[in-house]
Image (spheres, grey):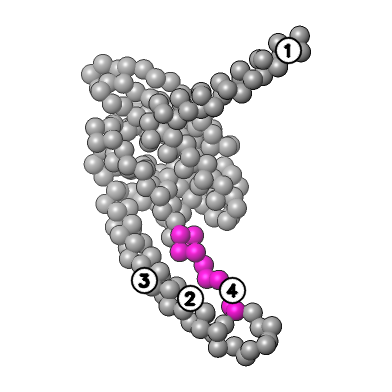
Amino acid sequence: MVVALTIMAVLLSLAFPAMKALRETEEPTHISGLLDLSHVLRAKAISEQRPYQIVIDHQKLYGLRYFYPYQEATTFQEFLLKQAEEREQRKQEIERMEVERMQMAQDGPEGTDAEPPPPLTNIDDEYFVREIMLPEDMRVEVRPWGELVWQPLEGDVIHRWVFQPNGLCDPLQIRFGQLGKWHEMTFEVLTGELAAQRFYTQQGT
């Protein structure tokens, strides 16, 4: 009996990595990226006590801090460009301040216990942005809470999925379509975890 249980344990230990590798190989990048990004943003929202969001359009998934509601993709793109410019300016400022900080530490009196100023803020913490590109022929649709009809994300239409500092997030039902095949996903409001998913074919899409 003990030998049989030992053999079973060994087989299971070998099977789980293989199953994990199979899942990672077969799961599309945008799906695993969405799952990973939702975990990261929810954790950051809780730890930093400020909201984060995933902005979804027909081309990309964007993960970043929540600032204000973007009504159109054009407005959101303008915000991204402005933030990129501010990030570059801030990066140059941090690099200059870092040189000054190190110089102050070197010029301090010898033999003293004076400590250099604390390290500066990480630029990626101030201007956190992650982007996941969707396949070129991918269709993206969302179904807002309480609605029966799927809304396609086309042109300037975007959708925001917000993660609050208390761990709660907006309800989300999203589906990705390609060549008439759909992958539908529903996420929990309380945890942001994937609650259900299904795969199906829908003619004429």
Please tell me the numbered disc located at residue 3. Answer: 1
Looking at the figure, which quarter contains the N terminus? Answer: top right
Please report whichever mark, 1 or 3, sits nearer to the chain's N-terminal start: 1
| In the rendered image, the vertical position of residue 79 relative to residue 115, given as above or below | above
Q: Is residue 173 visible?
A: no
- Mark 4 highlights which residue? 118
How far apart, in angstroms, are the residues tagged by discs 1 and 4?
58 Å
Which residue corresponds to mark 2?
98
Q: Count neighbours of disc 3 (C-alpha within 10 A) and say few if under 14, some if 14 to 19, many if 20 or more.
A: few
SS state under label 4: loop
Element class at badge 2? helix
The residue indicated by pointer 3 is: 89
| Amino acid of disc 2 | Glu
Whether label 4 touches label 2, CB < 8 Å: no
- Residue 148 in the image: above or below residue 121: above
Q: Amino acid at mark 1?
A: Val
Q: Along the polypeptide, which appears first: circle 4 or circle 3?
A: 3
Q: Quadrant of residue 160?
A: top left
Give left or right: position of 187 versus 76.
right
User: Which circle, 4 or 3, is nearer the viewer?
Assistant: 4
Q: Quarter of the image holding residue 89?
A: bottom left
Callout 1: helix, strand or loop?
Answer: helix
In front of the other: label 2 or label 1?
Answer: 1
Q: Measure the alpha-carbon separation of dots 1 and 3.
A: 65 Å
Q: Quarter of the image containing the C terminus?
A: top left
> Could you say where residue 92 lies in the image, as x and y percent from the top left?
38, 73
Res 85 → quadrant: bottom left
Q: Amino acid at mark 4?
A: Pro
| Amino acid at the residue labelled 3 | Gln
Q: Residue 79 appears at what percent x and percent y? A: 33, 58
